[in-house]
Image (cartoon, helix red, strand yellow):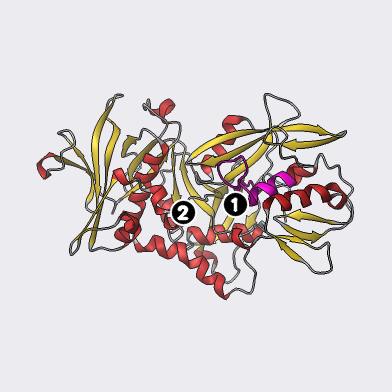
C-alpha cells in the first residue's frame, strides 16, 4: 500500500531472503517519477524488469529494459539482462546523479532477427581461420563463433583529449579491441593505434552530444571504463545507422554468446507456458455475419467491414475490431471522440521533439509508433513512426462524410470512424505508410 509520506513505497520480491541480503534501490520511469524496490543482492536486470512487469500488470513482450543513465556525463546504456544490478550500482560515485530507468527497448535484440539492417555491407569484413571470407548473412554467427574474426571499420569523429576539438579518423573494431589509423585508411599494424578493449569497458550512447560535448552531430557514443567513473573516449558517427552498427558490434564482442542466451531465454520459457502468445502473424480479420465464420483475407474487404460496422458495435453492445479480432464488449457510455485517450499508444500533448525522443528511446526499429495531438493544427492528430532508423511524422486529418466525422491519413481516400480503428487497420496493412504499425511506445506509472 502507498505510504502517506513522500517516500516512495517499497516493492518486495520475496520474503524468503534474509534481511542482510536485501538492499533498497530506486528505479525511474520516463516521466522521472520513481519507486523504491527492496531486492536481493544477486538480482539481475532481467529480474528487476520482471518484478515491475508483474507489479504493473504489463504485457511481457521481452522488450522491457533496465537502463543505466549517468546524468552528470550525459550518457546511458542498456544494462544487459544477465548483468548484476548491484555491480552496476557499485561503480557509481557517491556524488554523481546516476539513475536506473525502466522502459521499453524494442531494438534490444532486433539484430538477431534482422542482422543486415544493423550491419551495412560497406562497414563489415568477415574472415575465418579455416575458410577465408564468410557470407555477409552469417554476420551474427561470426560474432558468436570465436574461430571467426569479424571486423567493423569506417570513419568516426573523435574528441581529442583535454581539448574541445573533434577530429575524424578511420577506426577498426576487432576481437582484440578498438583501434584508429594514424595514416588514412591503412590497417597495417604499425599504423593502428589502440583505443580500448571491452573486458573492462562498456559502450554508452551520448545524449545531446552537440550541446554537452560540442560534437559535429547528435549521433555520439562513448567507451567508458568500468573501473574509472570519469574515463571517457568520446566518438561520434555521421548518422544513426552507423552509430547503431558500432554500438551493436561492441555489445556482441563484449558479451558474445551470453547475449544470444539472453535473447532466446524468454522464448524457451514461453514454449512451456500455458499462456497464449499473440504474434503479428497470428492476427486475422474474421467475418461472423453468416452462418459460418470465415477469415477475411482481402485487406480492402477487412477495412470496409470495419468501417461499415463502425461505432454501431464499438460504442454500443456489439463487438469491436481490436487487433483484427472481434471481441464481445459491454455497453459503453463514452464518446467515440475520446475513446483513444485511454489507449497506451496515445500520448496527448506531446511535442514533435518529445515524440522523437520517446520513439528513439524505445528503439529505432521499423514499426515503433505513437499517436499524439498536433501542436500546430488543433483538432488534428499526428502519427510518429520509425522507419529505417528515422522517425517520421504523419498528419491525421478529420474528414466530414455525410455529416459524420472521420479520420484519414491519405486525404480522405481511406477513412476511419475513430483513431482506434485507424491504428488497428495500419497494424494489419501498410497502406500509405512506409511500414506497418508494430510496437507502440508505452509509458507506465511505477
* Image location of residue 402, percent across then percent down: 87, 34
Magenta part, dominant SS: loop
Residue positioned 18% across, 62% down in the render: 129
Q: Tag 2, which secondary structure?
A: helix
Q: Residue furthest left?
A: 190
Q: Residue at x 28, y 54 (%)?
A: 199
Quarter assignment of residue 384: top right
Q: Which of the two residues, 209 or 109, is positioned nearer the viewer here?
A: 109
Q: Determine which of the numbered discs, if any, sits on residue 234 in the image.
A: none
Q: Is residue 79 left or right of residue 446?
A: left
Image point (51%, 64%), residue name: 20
441 inside magenta stretch: yes
Side of 130 where 262 appears, left or right: right
> As displayed, is residue 28 above or below residue 237?
below
Q: Earlier in the sequence, mark 1 or mark 2?
A: 1
Q: Is residue 339 left or right of residue 121?
A: right
Disc 1 residue crowd, few under 14, some 14–19, many 20+, Cα 10 Å? some
Residue at 75 percent of width and 46 percent of height: 342
> Where 124 falls versus 351 (above or below)?
below
Q: What span is colored magenta in the figure?
A: 421-446
Residue named by callout 2: 110
Q: Is residue 161 visible?
A: no
Query: What residue would you read off at disc 1?
Result: 36
Amino acid at each position: 500500500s502507498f505510504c502517506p509520506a513522500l517516500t516512495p513505497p517499497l516493492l518486495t520480491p520475496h520474503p524468503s531472503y534474509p534481511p542482510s541480503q536485501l538492499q533498497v534501490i530506486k528505479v525511474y520511469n520516463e516521466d522521472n517519477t520513481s519507486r523504491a524496490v527492496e531486492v536481493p543482492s544477486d538480482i539481475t536486470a532481467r529480474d528487476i524488469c520482471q518484478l515491475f512487469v508483474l507489479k504493473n500488470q504489463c504485457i511481457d513482450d521481452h522488450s522491457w529494459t533496465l537502463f543505466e543513465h549517468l546524468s552528470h556525463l550525459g550518457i546511458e546504456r542498456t544494462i544487459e539482462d544477465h548483468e548484476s544490478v548491484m555491480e552496476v550500482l557499485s561503480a557509481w560515485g557517491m556524488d554523481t546523479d546516476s539513475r536506473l530507468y525502466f522502459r521499453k527497448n524494442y531494438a534490444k535484440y532486433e539484430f538477431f532477427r534482422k542482422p543486415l539492417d544493423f550491419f551495412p555491407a560497406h562497414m563489415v569484413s568477415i574472415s575465418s581461420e579455416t575458410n577465408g571470407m564468410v557470407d555477409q548473412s552469417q554476420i551474427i554467427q561470426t560474432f558468436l563463433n570465436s574461430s571467426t574474426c569479424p571486423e567493423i571499420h569506417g570513419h568516426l569523429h573523435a574528441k581529442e583529449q583535454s581539448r574541445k576539438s573533434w577530429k575524424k579518423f578511420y577506426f577498426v573494431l576487432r576481437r582484440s579491441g578498438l583501434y584508429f589509423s594514424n595514416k588514412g585508411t591503412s590497417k597495417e599494424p604499425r599504423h593502428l593505434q589502440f583505443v580500448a578493449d571491452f573486458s573492462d569497458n562498456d559502450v554508452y550512447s551520448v545524449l545531446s552530444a552537440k550541446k554537452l560535448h560540442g560534437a559535429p552531430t547528435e549521433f555520439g557514443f562513448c567507451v567508458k571504463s568500468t573501473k574509472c567513473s570519469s574515463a571517457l573516449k568520446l566518438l561520434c558517427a555521421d548518422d544513426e545507422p552507423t552509430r547503431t552498427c558500432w554500438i551493436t558490434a561492441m555489445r556482441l564482442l563484449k558479451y558474445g554468446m551470453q547475449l544470444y542466451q539472453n535473447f532466446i531465454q524468454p522464448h524457451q520459457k514461453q514454449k512451456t507456458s500455458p499462456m497464449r502468445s499473440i504474434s503479428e502473424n497470428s492476427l486475422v480479420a474474421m467475418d461472423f455475419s453468416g452462418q459460418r465464420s470465415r477469415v477475411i483475407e482481402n485487406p480492402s474487404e477487412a477495412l470496409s467491414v470495419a468501417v461499415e460496422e463502425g461505432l454501431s458495435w464499438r460504442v454500443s453492445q456489439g463487438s469491436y475490431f481490436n487487433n483484427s479480432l472481434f471481441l464481445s464488449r459491454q455497453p459503453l457510455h463514452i464518446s467515440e471522440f475520446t475513446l483513444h485517450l485511454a489507449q497506451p499508444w496515445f500520448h496527448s500533448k506531446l511535442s514533435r521533439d518529445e515524440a522523437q525522443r520517446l520513439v528513439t528511446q524505445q528503439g529505432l526499429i521499423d514499426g515503433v509508433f505513437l499517436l499524439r495531438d498536433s501542436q500546430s493544427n488543433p483538432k488534428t492528430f499526428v502519427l510518429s513512426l520509425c522507419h529505417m532508423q528515422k522517425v517520421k511524422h504523419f498528419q491525421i486529418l478529420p474528414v466530414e462524410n455525410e455529416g459524420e466525422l472521420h479520420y484519414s491519413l491519405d486525404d480522405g481516400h481511406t477513412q476511419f470512424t475513430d483513431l482506434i480503428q485507424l491504428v488497428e487497420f495500419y497494424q494489419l496493412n501498410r497502406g500509405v505508410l512506409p511500414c506497418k504499425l508494430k510496437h507502440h511506445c508505452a509509458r507506465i506509472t511505477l
